[in-house]
Structure formats: structure tokens, C-alpha cells
Image (cartoon, rainbow, N blue to C red):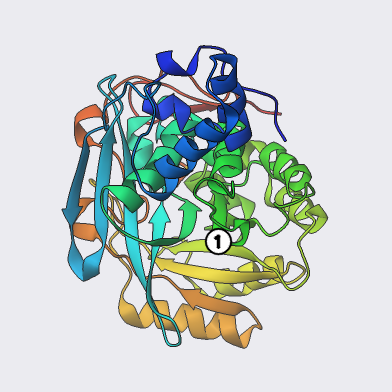
Amino acid sequence: MSGIRPRRPVAEQGLLDIMGMTSDEFVAASFEQGVPRGRALQAYRTMFREGRFEGDWFGIEDPPVNRREVEGQTTKFTLALGDDHETESVLIPMHHRKHGTTRTLCVSSQIGCAMGCEFCETAQMGLVRNLSAGQIVSQWWAATHRVDTTVKNMVFMGMGEPMDNLDEVLQSIRVLTDHNGPAVPSSNISISTVGRIDGINRVAEFVKQPGYHRLNLAISVNAPNDRIRSELMPINRAMKMSELQEALLAFPLRGGAAFCAEYVLIPGVNDGDDHCDELSRWLEPLRCSLNVIPYNPRRDSPWPAPEEHDVERFISRAIANGCFVKRRGTKGRDVMAACGQLGNPEIRRRKRVEGSGLVQPVVEGRSLKVDPR
Ligand code: SF4
């Protein structure tokens, strides 16, 4: 259990701060203001279970939620943060043979991103700022109580690199899994990372705590070797694929679980047969599934989307090489809701105000300075 986080009285905090508290933290902070524990706990449950606010210490209004339906029932929604910024989230329908259709919520952990991946629309913004735990949890709350959707799974795959804002991401997971709150099973939550090894090591420690051992980890691999990966993903200039593999091998995966290795398939860049074979060899010692994502061209992209027959060829070859392969569609392309396409165009050119200290984007243009550790 984390320490008591709120330092300001609950009454002075906004809704988005309050949503960053676990029930224990909320009850303790409310109790300090004279609110009986039982009443505070009831208010916490009502906020998360029914989307209503009880008690006069909730002197707050709903944050404005804007939503837009797109193809195949994919919904993108934004949540105004009151500082001229907004979170962006996507609700994606997942069709299962046995369970019908469920919804996966893709949440943002930052506004913009400092990681500068070449294929990614969000990278064009640079990092504007981190989101707080409450601002992350509020995306679940808005999806559930204002967009009125039952969310089954959550993936940290929206704007931002979760490992670049890990304190807030882990706190949001404590809240999301709180039985008095959203009660999302940790097995239904995935953190997707560009491959920050320091972050992977911290998550490895986090999942050793009771209640979190079923948390899932997805890695954006996107290349078969260091040469291509360093061109596509600046993080690889600091953290090589061999080090990434080592960190994943040391990760305490629960029995029967597997990593998800994401691979954005880009024509002429990483989609050759030799690329597939090299990737398969890199994946071989890891317990993982390979998630092939046909490239979804960002604005001013130098690459087109791959041809269907090339996607099928790559997947068939990976299967023949012994990989367990899934294919992800690119739902929501027409509202900039597809993978690697989140990012409000109006704020895309805003300058970075804070960063990880590892990869520091130069604010004009797309060049990056990378710590050569
Ligand atoms: S792919 Fe992910 S980590 Fe890379 S720039 Fe985009 S949002 Fe950031």
C-alpha cells in the first residue's frame, strides 16, 4: 500500500486529483477533515461505481467529455483538463468467438510523447506534459460513466510512454484495481512500452507485490535488429535490443503468461523475409506473442500502408518460424484514433515542458538528442 498522497484537504482538490487516490488514501484524507470513514468510503464507491458524487466535500463539476463515434464502433473521446490541455482515449471493440464483443480502453499517460518514434503521429507533438494518476484514472471513469461503456480491458497505449511517467502510471493502476473503486482486474491491464529498461525493471518489482502479478507488459519492438530499430526508435540508441531481451528474460512472468511484442509492419523498412527470420530469432527465447500491426501512415509519412499480401506473407513466415502471431487491425483511422495517431493537431506544435531526462526532443523539427549511456 502506498503512503497517503493528498497533502491538500480533499475539499480543495479537483475531481481529477481525487481520482488519483486509492480508497484508503481518500478515506484517510477525508477523515482528517472530520468526515467519518464509513461515509467517505461510501462516497468513494459511489463515485466509481455509479459515477455520482456524494458529500459536500465534492464541490466539483464534471470535466467536459467530447466523444466521436467512428468506424466499427470505435470511439475516441477527449477529456478537458482545465489547463488548455486534454487527454485522448480510444474505446476499441474486440470481437470474441465465445464472449461476443467487449471494449478495450486505450488510455494516454502523457500529453504528447518525448520518444520520437518515426512512424508515430503523437511523436510530432514532442512531450507537452505528464498526466497525473487522477487524470489517467479519469479516462476510465469518463468511458464508464459518461460515454456509458463497459470497459473490459485497459491498455496504456495512447499518447505517451508509460515508463516515462511511471510513478503516476503505477499509482493509477493501484486505483484502477482498487476493489472499492474501478476494480479492474490487473490481468486486464497492459502497460505498453517503447522498451525503457529502467521502467521494465521497476515494473518487474511492482508485479511482485500482492495483487499485481497478473499485470501485462507489451513491448514495441518494430524492428529485427539494432540498425533498423535505432532509425525508427531513438530509444534504441541508448538501450539496445540485447539489453531489452535481457530485461525481459529477467521479468517475473506469472505461469502461463506471455509478453506481447508489437511490430508495426512498414513496407520496405522491416517487412522483408530476412527481417521476419531475424525477428523470430530474437523472440525465440522469450515467452511472447507477436502482434503484427500494419503501418497506419501518419501525416506526411514517408511510407505507405503495407499491401495486404505482404502482411499475410510476413505473418505466415513468422508462424512457420514458430512464433505465436496475432494481427491487429487499424481501427479508427479516420479520426486519428488508430495506433500511433493520437495527438490533437492544434497542440502538436507546442513545446515540451518536461521530459524523462533520457531522451530530450529538440523542440523544433524532429531531431532528438539521446543520452549516449
Ligand atoms: S509510438 Fe508510443 S513511445 Fe513512440 S513516440 Fe509514439 S506514443 Fe511515444
Residue ID for mark 1:
188
- Residue under the point 44% across and 60% down: 269
Q: Quadrant of residue 173?
A: top right
Q: Residue 183: horizontal and vertical position, in percent?
A: 54, 53
Amino acid type at image mark 1:
Asn
Q: Quadrant of ligand 1?
A: top left
Q: Quadrant of residue 121?
A: top left
- 294 or 182, which is in the foreground? 182
Q: Sort mark 1 into few (<14), some (14-19) or many (20+) by Cα contacts within 10 Å.
A: some
Q: Residue 327: horizontal and vertical position, in percent?
A: 45, 75
| Residue 309 as seen in the image, left or right of residue 192 | left
305 vs 35: above or below? below
65 vs 69: above or below? above
- Residue under the point 48% across and 54% down: 155
| Quarter of the image with the C terminus in it | top right
289 vs 38: above or below? below
- 41 or 74, which is in the foreground? 41
| Residue 299 as seen in the image, left or right of residue 152 | left
88 vs 346: above or below? below
Q: Residue 221: horizontal and vertical position, in percent?
A: 57, 57
| Quarter of the image with the N terminus in it | top right
- Residue under the point 56% across and 32% down: 168
Q: Secondary structure at mark 1?
A: helix
* Camera sees residue 341: no
- 235 or 208, which is in the foreground? 208
Mark 1, ligand 1, within 8 Å: the answer is: no
- Residue under the point 33% across and 40% down: 52
Q: Residue 225: horizontal and vertical position, in percent?
A: 62, 57
| Residue 208 as seen in the image, left or right of residue 280 | right
